[in-house]
Image (tube, rainbow, N blue to C red):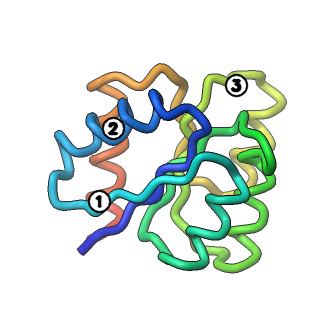
Amino acid sequence: MMNILIVDDSRFSQKVTSGLIKQFIPDAVQHFADDGLEGLEKYKEIKPDFMIIDLLMPKLRGQDLIEEVKKIDIDAKIIVLSADVQHKVREVIDKMGVLTFINKPLNEEKAKTIANLIRNDAQ
């Protein structure tokens, strides 16, 4: 059973991400967190196989969440899904060992990319 934790402060984004991922990985169990702090708590509790993280969130920014999760498990599998496309931000995030950085808005094509990445990595 594969667990995916979606961390995004927008419920709308959570629904969109969840729906699109479900199309391509119907058997995955999805969990949600509304901010970085809740994301960190849920990570510790669930130990998900994959995390999909937004960068711009209250309480704990996505970047800080990634740092905290990587302290717990350097091999944590993290996909960044964000509207923050600043070049500097992207460079920093890429160096943090995330699987990929996908720009919002998420669409079917981008969701398929994420699903393929998850499937290939899970094997």
Looking at the rendering, in which quadrant would you find the N terminus? bottom left
Image-based side of 12 in relation to 2, left or right: right
Residue 49 in the image: state x and y as whole percent: 42, 70
> Mark 3 sits on what residue?
84
Quick one: SS at disc 1? Answer: helix
- Of the residues shown, which amino acid type is indicated by label 3? Asp
Q: CA distance from mark 1 to mark 2?
A: 11 Å
Viewer-side residue, 121 vs 60: 60
Q: Is residue 99 visible?
A: no
**On the image, which quarter does residue 54 sit in?**
top right
Nearer-N-terminus badge (1/2): 2
Which image quarter: residue 28? bottom left
Q: Which mark is residue 120?
A: 1
Q: CA distance from mark 2 to mark 3?
A: 19 Å
* Amino acid type of the residue tagged 2 in the rendering: Thr
Residue type at the position of mark 1: Asn
Label 1 Cα crowd, 10 Å radius (few <14 / some 14-19 / many 20+)? few
Residue at coordinates 53% horizontally, 44% vertically from top-left?
A: 100
Location of residue 19 in the rendering, given as x and y in whole percent from the top left corner: 27, 36
Pointers 1 and 3 in contact (C-beta within 8 Å) = no
Q: Which residue is mark 2?
A: 113
